Image (cartoon, grey):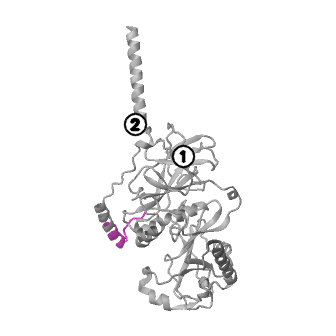
Amino acid sequence: MRFKWAIRRIFIILLTSFLIYSTFLAIYGGTDDEEPDYPYNFDPAKDEIFVKNYLKLLQMGRASARPVIEKEAKVHENYWCFLKFPKITRKSGNWLTMAGVEVFSAYFDDRENSLYTQNSAVQILVMSNHSIEKANVLIFCNIFSTSTREYAAVKGYIREIWQTGWDPRNSFQVPSLITCPIPTRMPKSSQNLVVSLTRRRCHNVPEAMQVLGKPEQGKGAKKDVAVCLKGLDYQIPITLPRGNTNDPIARTNYLKSNRPAKRRHELLPYNDCFYQHIHTHRYVLIIDIDEAVVPVRHDNYSQLLADFEQKKAIKNWKISSIAARNVFKFPSNFTLFPRRHHMTSNRKRSKKTSPNGEYGKSFSSTSSVATVFNHFALHKLSQNVAKSQYFSENDALKLHYKSECPWESRNECHTLEYDVVDDTSLDKFMEKLSQRVDDVAKELRSGWGIDV
């Protein structure tokens, strides 16, 4: 009798163990082969209705906007994960499909912030088909230290790098920042980290992305300004995510004819360049190739920013971004200088300075900003960060060289093109600027066979 009871007990224990193990595998187990992409569930008809309703609310001043400052969130770590180290690690800056999104780059971030106040984080820049934040898609991060062989599985926090008010349509690929908090038990070093994304907690995936850590020179004093030149559509190794053409000519035509998609795609290289410099520079200036931010009273950006910080910074508030207001410079008939010196030969600019918020370009602070937009800082790191501020016209101007009046300013093109004043803002930089242009032209001729 005792023997039978012993057999029954063993059977019950084995059955219970099997059920527990099966349940564990159902929740935490599986491989990437079983992991589906996130369900899009995109309904064009519903999106059209949403857009119409949102635009009505926008006209009435009642449309909601996503907060740009995050409240404190709890670190959701899955302690009972048994993860395998990924077999393949991709370098940051190369597209990698994980968890149904296109991952571009990953950066170590130990700046003070309101989201995870006690934790450093891995910041991941991704593109997705439609909004993953609005769809409440769950993304989990597997963070590995290849030096200590430790790992952690945590829930990611998604911030869409876009505001609905700019364009409420959800029919385009959307850039997002996924923040993966690093548990405090993990090594403090920013080196030798890799990260993978999954749609289910504790899933093993064969590939991961290298996390770019703090550079060694970043331990010293930061430099003042890094300039990021928009590089979305040049004939260099830069690509769009999966699902888009990457033949250079076809890509150029696609972006030229699809402005809403272009505006979203260009935010990824903007933010990637911003994160490349969060440990090495105090500010990042993002500009286009036809723009130049010029200090008017000062000799350089360092003096310009120091003067603003001393005189105009808001007490007890951190600076997010400082914008230079825009003036247009249209083609000049003055031909004394070679064509490559069009910046210095064009001595006229529009008399009207664009209003605050229109066409300006900003110095965004790397100590207080989480994401950047084309013209200003977007998401802030903490509560005590001020809104975008502006230089006066006497301190800085953004010279905008255009071949013709932009479509957005079509109602005032005549004024902008013909009501002009003398532009002396570049005079003190004339000699150095001309010499640098000639040096680059010489290098292009000798190294690339390009005559400019």
Numbered mark located on residue 26 in the image: 2
Residue 59, given in percent of the width and then of the height, sits at: 35, 73
Q: Nearer the viewer, residue 401 or 131?
A: 401
Residue at the right extreme of this rendering: 220
Circle 1 packing at 10 Å, graded few (<14), some (14-19), many (20+), is few
Position of 305 with respect to 242 (left or right) is right
Residue 294, given in percent of the width and then of the height, sits at: 62, 79
Residue located at (41% from left, 22% from top): 14
Asked if residue 43 is positioned above or below residue 88 in the image, the reply reads below
Viewport quadrant of the C terminus = bottom right
Is residue 55 one of those drawn in magenta?
yes
Q: Nearer the viewer, residue 258 or 382?
A: 258
Asked if residue 350 is positioned above or below residue 42 in the image, the reply reads below
Is residue 381 one of those drawn in magenta?
no
In terms of secondary structure, where does tag 2 sit? helix
Of the two numbered discs 1 and 2 on the same chain, state the one appearing first in sequence.
2
Numbered mark located on residue 197 in the image: none
Residue 183, given in percent of the width and then of the height, sits at: 56, 45
In terms of secondary structure, where does tag 1 sit? strand
For the residues labelled 1 and 2, the Cα–Cα distance comes to 26 Å
Viewport quadrant of the N terminus = top left
Residue located at (68% from left, 58% from top): 218
Q: What is the tally of numbered marks visible in this picture?
A: 2
Residue where numbered disc 1 is placed: 88
Q: Nearer the viewer, residue 177 or 105?
A: 105
> Magenta part of the protein: which range?
53-65
Q: Nearer the viewer, residue 377 or 17?
A: 17
Asked if residue 51 is positioned above or below residue 353 in the image, the reply reads above
Foreground disc of the pair 1, 2? 1
Residue 260 in view of the camera: yes
Residue at the top extreme of this rendering: 1
Q: Amino acid at mark 1?
A: Ile
